[in-house]
Amino acid sequence: MAGRYTLYFGPQHPGAPGNVGFRLEMEGERVVRAELIPGFLHRGFEKMMENRKWENSYVLSYRFCVEDPDPFEVAYAEALDMVFKVDPPPKAKYFRMIQAEFSRIASHMFWTHFMLGSVGLRTPAYWALAAREEILKWFAWVTGHRIYHNFSVPGGIRSDVPQDFQSRTLDLTYRVEDLVKDVEKAVLGNRVFKRRTRGVGVIKGETALRLGATGPVVRGGGLAYDVRKLAPYERYDSVNFEVPVGEVGDAYDRALVRFREVHESLKIIRQAAMEVRPGGPYRVKIPLTAPPGRGYARVESARGEYTVHVTSVGGRSPYRVRFKSPSMPLLTTVLDYIIKNEEVTIADFPVVLASLDPCAPDIDR
Amino acid sequence: MVLSTIAEAVKYLFKRPYTRLVPAKTGPFKTDRMRGAHILDMSKCTGCSMCQQVCPANAIDMVEVPGQYPQNPRRRFPRIDLHRCTFCALCVEYCPFDALYMTSVTGFELYTRDKSTTLKSPVELSRGDYTLVTVKRDLYVTKEVKASG
Amino acid sequence: MASLLRRLVDWARSRSPWMIHYCAACGAVEFPPLVMSPLDWERYGYMPVPSPRQADFVAGMGYLTRKTVKLMINLFRQTPNPKFVVAGCNCTATGGLYWDSYATYKRLDDFFTVSGWVPGCMPMPDDWTALITDLRRQIYEGLKGDKLKDAEEFIARVEEGERKWREEYFAKPQPPVNYAFKETYPECEERYERVKLCVTSVRRERLKTALAELKEKGFVLLSNIDAVDYPKNGVIELYYFVENKDDSSQVALKTFVPRSEPEIESVHDLYPNALFIEREVYEMMGVVFKGHPELRKWILDGNWEGPPPLRKDVDTATYVVKTFYGGDKYGR
């Protein structure tokens, strides 16, 4: 059947990346244009932040992206550190790194489950979710909640770490590594997975950057662009890690990059955990009113660079908070580019979507 | 090859199952720092409404309670809406008199068919089970250092 | 005999409640652990199904944005009887943390009758099992299921009120411009070494040339556009954050537009992703980008009909408390 027709894809669709929809223009089997329909998850964070006070606004700060909340939490805490001109104790900085990296691993494992669903390889997805579950349990043990940790606060971290923090954290990294290795072997070596992803959704790193994307999509295209290396925040300048890159920039390369990133993250966690011991200062109390000024923070989330811009005119509340959404270019400009430059059929469309790893709530905010 | 996936999968046949038993049999998952439903110590609360001020979800309202409370002459105590609370524990952290705690009681125990039951009056809050207390104020406020700049 | 058959049907039905696979909000992130490892739903016959026509219940998982609610009503209509609505998370029950959000409805029971509530932000997988187990009991007891309330009328009333507000807002005269501005481009006026940010100001007529110059120098990535509203000064400040592809240093170009005439040239031909960021700034702040091919409501479409919500003189919190909580901000 040839001829053009319009097809609505999502938001209620197992292949849709969360609660977003697409209006697809089709020509037979081929998708010729995809228009994003966002807004199903819009809550108006930027307005709500203005109604909150400095000391409780951070409770909102990490809810943009449920899959990967901690880089967002760390970024807002960093921006407020800049507004209040405080320097958190080193232990807090190292802990924030551990938190952000664990969140990255959990997010990549969640992505694995989502990606494998779209190529029909469900078994390793169970192991990936088991790895994520182990991390969520660790979070519940240290911070008190599985998803919304509420732990990196302006001025440091919220409470001291438990007594056996180091040993349990290191133990966890080895357990997660075992599971991730199994998943990796089962996924990347699988011929079906290769066939479904090789040459699908090709985009070069520099092109992606010009279109506004950052993160694994750029790195999969062969450009080692990572804020953790280029503009180190917290104590990323003091740990050893590499920035994995792909070659072709197709869906397979992005998967490869994500799996390698998990191992780099584990490396970072092992180094940082050595610096976090129970006892000693972990938090600088911030005052109730802020000086006028500007706060800015840039972090590398699992989906790319994330920035916060806080404008303060003094007083007890932020005057304006603006967030960058790392997922928005993925589903708009990058997806457009891919659809224009190669033949994406409706069967491949969920694979392309999943390989970009967008986070729906962070587009809408 | 597809065989590599199958080989890995076969390996998992000989491992212990990761799947947990039902929570009704093994008990739900809890940790020592779990942030759950509140307990109010009515013999400590002075009705300063600090928790009301700091709550980001506006879940806490100060209501008047009959009875005699020497430390709280206006008899105003927090009423917490557990169906609005976001369990961030800021009220516990900011309570200057150490009167609020959090327990490991979460949705598993709080499940209800009638949502008006989750609006907890101060008296109901004070009847909580103290053996389940997980989060106290001293978890958050020890070893603070003053801002230098 | 008939009653025995009836009970048998109810028993059989209670053994396999299927849920519509619809990840409505943040609560959905706890479903993969529930459906797959470690709690593995399917051993009890629960399953997420793609089509509402095969489903038995709809789950509200977190905040109900207005667009989502319209969709849920639609899904619920397509589900065969008897059908159930269950609600997890706090935002479905009272608005939760987003009590002052202009884009969400606050209570699921404004639209449906609801069979069970599980509080939590967010509920853990175990907490969801409590809800599903009870739902199973309810189906076994032979309850008739949940119903739709007359929701359309409520939605229409709210949206009509907002449209009126929008008209009133734009009919108001704007304050005169009272704002000190000095062009410093290409020198930095503020510099932040650690985040590699340099803030510089440029007049709005020269903004596009300045951005073109910066793009030549390697600032190929438009990171974000920020708009800050100052009603007292009568201006909206705009910040264009661009990023260098080599060393990832950033430049924030600061400019302003008067509130009486908030117009600026679109930069989408320099930075393709500006198309969407500009669209967002347009709907949230009411800044018009000249030359933008498709300037329309996007994220707010279906969510908000009132004036641009991020303007400082648009008090959405008071409006929301008045409309949805009857004036009591601690109420339900």
Image (cartoon, helix red, strand yellow):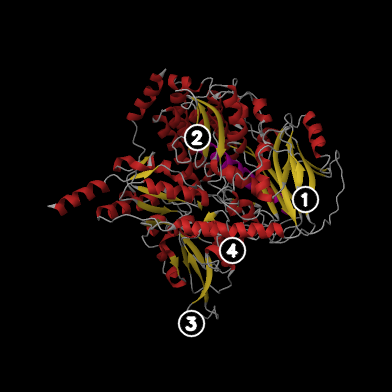
Mark-to-mark CA distance, 3 and 4: 25 Å
Q: Amino acid at mark 3?
A: Gln
Q: Which structural element holds mark 2?
A: helix
Q: Which structural element holds mark 4?
A: helix
Q: Are marks 3 and 1 in contact (CB under 8 Å)?
A: no
Foreground of the two, B46 or C141? C141
Mark-to-mark CA distance, 2 and 4: 37 Å
Q: How many marks?
A: 4
Q: For the residue carrying disc 4, how many other residues have a C-alpha within 10 Å: few (<14), some (14-19), or many (20+)? A: some
Tag of residue B68: 3
Q: Are marks 3 and 2 in contact (CB under 8 Å)?
A: no
Tag of residue C261: 1
Q: Amino acid at mark 4?
A: Tyr
Q: For the residue carrying disc 3, how many other residues have a C-alpha within 10 Å: few (<14), some (14-19), or many (20+)? A: few
- Same subunit under labels 3 and 1? no
The chain letter for the residue carrying disc 3 is: B
> Residues in magenta?
A81-109
Mark-to-mark CA distance, 1 and 2: 45 Å
**Nearest-to-viewer mark from 3 and 2:** 2
**Percent position of residue C164, x then y:** 62, 59
Mark-to-mark CA distance, 3 and 2: 57 Å
Residue at which label 4 appears = B94
